[in-house]
Image (cartoon, rainbow, N blue to C red):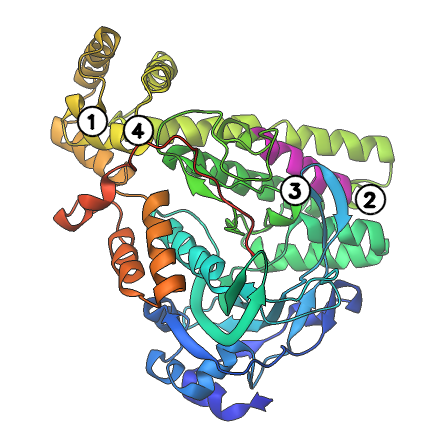
């Protein structure tokens, strides 16, 4: 039911530019109503930034929007079509349990997708029920907002509503719907779908839409191929994004091509997690048996995914197939340079280093090797160095670490910036807290099993400003107790 009153009271200003693309790219349909919707959590700050009224969004009619029982005026719900490589295997996909309500026009002139996740079956459900469980939706809320606090481009979470209906997986679980906000939901897989199922003209229209939506700015120069420009700009954003993941120890867990956005935002928080003990081979996902998406492999997989985007764009890059491939390869060859630039710059900042010296990369790699050999906690090692407490790294008695400290201090002494400036740079670059896996699980268990949301709210509070180094964050910086079984994550159910 479309409700103009909700639009006016809540502040919805929805349009559907995506719905103006050819119908190949979507199926128009409404969400499936639920029996007893209740608001679980609302992101007041995000709502206000979007031009929405948080008070009005707590009213039952607005909660009905978050659950899929009503649709605000201006919305044109649709499920997006896309394809993708999942763990290296190509398959046809699409929004099997999500609906794009439209794009909110924000007070600052922006345009943000508003999507319901878990709102029922769509033509792309592939036999699924189109529903979602409360725990995984709250998990996405926590991790996506933590990523935002860390300053990493990400989709955001506006609200989670419970449905009052069960979902059946291995067990019976509480149903819920997440309202996700994104710069857009365009994916590499959207282009793969267009290249495989559409015409050359439909592919071109999608590319033009992506350029206008995300890369309008100055745009390509008069002599530059517009679609080479698009590929290069996506590559640059993805190189920067993955470098930022590496710098905070974030492991996405499911870097399929349908989970790589054209905007350069992190999307899909199913089996993701943050490293505790530093180990480049770390994998959390229960279904990633071969470590395809391990921490150390993320940059390589980023290039692989971008190559799939390049393949999809080949008909637009040049009318001659051989020339199109050469243009694509030339762009793809730029990834490592962009990634290394962002990564090394970020690692220098984590160590309080200004400027560049030829030995910096070796200094960084030596520290990481020591951390791996001595099972040091990734986040807390840099936190301890930031606080001037090297013994708190757990490597205080290691002679090689003492030698490394001397090299580091020597490097610091050669720069003109003061020690205070270096410490401040480190504080801005090293989070005091991350969403520790045991803390996230603690919050989810309290919410899903006991309807106790206070644990989650406290966690979200300390994650909102991870660089604060506040007393309230101390307990949340503690790593988990030793366990005989490794932590595992699962794709959102």
Please state if 219 lies on the left or on the right of 108 as rendered: right
User: Residue tagged by mark 4?
Assistant: 377
Residue at 54% across, 90% down: 3
Q: CA distance from mark 1 to mark 3?
A: 39 Å
Q: What is the x, y in percent for residue 138?
A: 43, 60
Dot 3 alpha-carbon crowd within 10 angstroms: few under 14, some 14 to 19, many 20 or more: many
Residue annotated with mark 1:
385
Q: Which numbered tag is attached to residue 231? A: 3
Give the answer, above or below, for where 103 lies relative to 73: above
What's the mark number on residue 472?
none
Mark 2 residue element: helix
Label 2, label 4: how many angstroms apart (C-alpha)? 47 Å
Up the image or down, 396 lies above or below 450; here it is above
Disc 2 crowd, CA 10 A, few/some/many (<14, 14-19, 20+)? some
Q: Earlier in the sequence, mark 1 or mark 4?
A: 4
**Location of residue 395 by image quarter:** top left
Given residues 469 and 351, the one toward you in this image is 469
The picture places residue 21, in percent across and down from the top left corner, at 73, 67
Q: Would you say residue 102 is visible in this rendering?
A: yes
**Numbered mark located on residue 315 in the image:** 2
Tell me how many marks there are: 4
At 49% across and 66% down in the image, what residue appears? 178
- Residue 13 against residue 242 in the figure, above or below: below
């Amino acid at each position: 039911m479309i409700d103009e009153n909700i639009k006016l009271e809540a502040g919805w200003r929805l349009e559907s530019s995506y719905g103006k693309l050819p119908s190949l790219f979507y199926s128009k349909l409404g969400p499936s109503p639920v029996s007893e919707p209740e608001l679980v959590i609302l992101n007041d700050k995000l709502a206000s930034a979007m031009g929405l009224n948080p008070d009005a969004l707590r009213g039952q009619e607005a909660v009905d929007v978050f659950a899929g029982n009503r649709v605000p005026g201006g919305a044109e719900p649709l499920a997006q079509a896309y394809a993708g490589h999942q763990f290296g295997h190509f398959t046809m996909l699409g929004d099997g349990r999500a609906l794009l309500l439209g794009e909110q026009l924000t007070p600052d002139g922006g345009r943000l997708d508003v999507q319901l996740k878990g709102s029922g079956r769509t033509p792309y459900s592939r036999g699924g029920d189109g529903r979602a469980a409360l725990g995984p939706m709250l998990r996405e809320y926590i991790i996506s907002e933590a990523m935002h606090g860390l300053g990493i481009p990400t989709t955001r979470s506006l609200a989670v509503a419970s449905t009052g209906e069960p979902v059946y997986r291995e067990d019976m679980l509480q149903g819920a719907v997440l309202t996700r906000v994104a710069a857009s939901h365009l994916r590499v897989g959207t282009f793969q779908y267009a290249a495989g199922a559409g015409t050359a003209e439909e592919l071109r229209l999608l590319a033009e839409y992506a350029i206008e939506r995300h890369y309008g700015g100055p745009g390509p120069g008069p002599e530059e191929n517009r679609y080479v420009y698009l590929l290069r700009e996506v590559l640059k954003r993805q190189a920067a994004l993955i470098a930022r993941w590496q710098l905070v120890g974030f492991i996405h867990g499911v870097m399929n091509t349908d989970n790589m956005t054209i905007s350069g935002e992190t999307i899909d928080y199913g089996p993701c997690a943050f490293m505790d003990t530093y180990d480049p081979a770390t994998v959390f996902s229960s279904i990633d048996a071969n470590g395809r998406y391990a921490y150390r492999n993320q940059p390589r997989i980023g290039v692989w995914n971008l190559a799939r985007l390049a393949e999809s764009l080949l008909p637009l890059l040049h009318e001659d197939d051989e020339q199109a491939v050469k243009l694509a390869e030339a762009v793809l060859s730029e990834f490592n340079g962009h990634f290394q630039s962002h990564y090394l710059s970020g690692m220098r900042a984590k160590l309080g280093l200004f400027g560049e010296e030829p030995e910096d990369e070796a200094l960084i790699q030596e520290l990481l090797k020591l951390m791996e050999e001595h099972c040091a906690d990734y986040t807390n090692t840099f936190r301890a160095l930031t606080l001037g407490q090297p013994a708190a790294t757990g490597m205080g008695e290691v002679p090689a670490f003492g030698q490394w400290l001397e090299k580091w201090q020597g490097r610091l002494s050669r720069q003109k910036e003061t020690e205070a400036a270096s410490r401040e740079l480190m504080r801005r670059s090293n989070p005091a807290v991350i969403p520790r896996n045991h803390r996230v699980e603690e919050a989810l268990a309290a919410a899903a099993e006991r309807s106790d949301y206070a644990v989650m709210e406290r966690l979200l509070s300390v994650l909102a400003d991870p660089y604060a180094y506040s007393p309230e964050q101390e307990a949340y910086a503690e790593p988990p107790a030793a366990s005989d079984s490794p932590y595992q994550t699962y794709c959102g159910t």
